Image: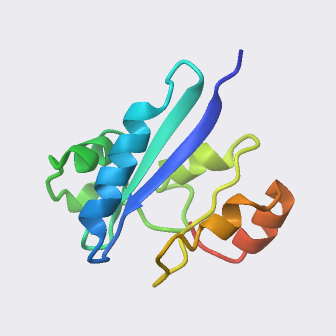
Amino acid sequence: MKKLRVGILFGGRSGEHEVSLLSAASVFNAMDKNKYEVVPIGITKQGHWVTAADAERLLKGEFSHHPERHLRAGDPETTPGAAVLANGQAVVVPPEPHQQGGSLTAFQTESSQALARRASDRAI
């Protein structure tokens, strides 16, 4: 059975950064790794995107600043986490800046086509 690829996007410059990390770590740990290919995508307090082992370290609070390993939003060549999600049938829904209080809930109730239309003008 093919695993469903799921991206967990967390962190950011917000004052809620630590809350986001705790929530993402809880989801990451609860995911059945036999059913899902979990791709953590973190955003540091400085606004730098990280993925893979660096994102997992960020979730655990062990991340150290490595500027050469930062990812640029919108560039699939240097954003492997986003590129991994973009391949196949996964839909990437980037966060909307300055939103809070579950504003991404609206995205979760729409069809994949509607999600793709809404996300098409946003950089990953």
Q: How many marks?
A: 0
> Which residue corresponds to the image point at 74% horizontal and 40% vertical from the top-left?
88
View extreme (front): residue: 101
> Which residue corresponds to the image point at 83% horizontal and 65% vertical from the top-left?
114
Residue 21, relative to residue 26: is it above or below? below
The residue nearer to you, when weighing 32 against 13, is 32
The residue nearer to you, when weighing 40 against 74, is 40
Task: Please state the horizontal and vertical placement of residue 89, each as a whole percent of the image.
Answer: 76, 43
Task: Please state the horizontal and vertical placement of residue 38, each as a whole percent of the image.
Answer: 50, 36
Task: Please state the horizontal and vertical placement of residue 77, each as a whole percent of the image.
Answer: 53, 55
Q: Is residue 44 visible?
A: no
Residue 30, relative to residue 44: is it above or below? above
Horizontal side of 121 relative to 64 (left or right) equals: right
View extreme (bottom): residue: 98
Residue 13, image quadrant: bottom left
> Which residue corresponds to the image point at 41% horizontal and 39% vertical from the top-left?
28
Residue 64, relative to residue 4: is it above or below? below
> Which residue corresponds to the image point at 43% horizontal and 66% vertical from the top-left?
72
Horizontal side of 12 relative to 99 (left or right) equals: left
Residue 26, image quadrant: top left
Q: Quadrant of the C terminus?
A: bottom right
Q: Is residue 81 visible?
A: yes
Horizontal side of 18 relative to 120 (left or right) equals: left
Color encoding of the figure: rainbow
Task: Please state the horizontal and vertical placement of residue 51, each as a whole percent of the image.
Answer: 39, 48
Residue 42, relative to residue 34: is it above or below? below
Q: Quadrant of the N terminus?
A: top right
